[in-house]
Amino acid sequence: MGRQISALDAEAVRAQSLQEAIDKGGFVPLAQAARTTNIPLTTLADAVRQGRIPAVRVQPNRWVVRVSAVELALKGDKALGPSQAQIDQALVEAGLMTIPAGGFKPLTRATPIDFGDGGPTVSQTIIREREERERAIHGH
């Protein structure tokens, strides 16, 4: 039980650190930006998804934006979003990401894996199973 509580405490500290990083950068949740700018939340969310307004995803379905970026977009100016380095730094400060000592290195070349079993590919297996299921359902 004590271990579970400490894990919850650690998660609360990470969430607080993330919130402080967001506040320091002038970011607000999408819903708050929508209320502040009188833009419907769905319209603002669409603009973020389409890349017309820069935003930072802090959870799978949670975005934060700068109200100033939304206002610039309303004026038709291209809003300046945070650089990837600024986003990475905020995530590091929040304890949500670590950066290796030498920095990130791009993958130079990925070599395909050859399983060499000669069997069907995954997609071929899925197609075959769907066809078998259709035949079983429709009796063909």
Image (tube, rainbow, N blue to C red):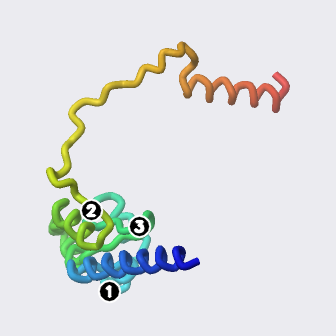
Label 2: which residue?
52
Question: Label 3's element?
Answer: strand
Q: Which mark is residue 59?
A: 3
Is 114 left, or right, of 125 in this rendering?
left
The disc label shown at residue 36, or none: 1
Q: Of discs 1 and 3, which sits in the foreground?
A: 3
Q: Residue at x 19, y 69 (%)?
A: 76
Q: Secondary structure at mark 2?
A: loop
Residue 99 in the figure: left or right of residue 64: left
Extreme-front residue of the structure: 2
Label 3 vs label 2, nearer the camera: 3
Res 39 seen here: no
Picture quadrant of residue 130: top right
Name which residue lies at 69% across and 28% down.
129
Q: CA distance from mark 1 to mark 2?
A: 18 Å
Q: Earlier in the sequence, mark 3 or mark 2?
A: 2
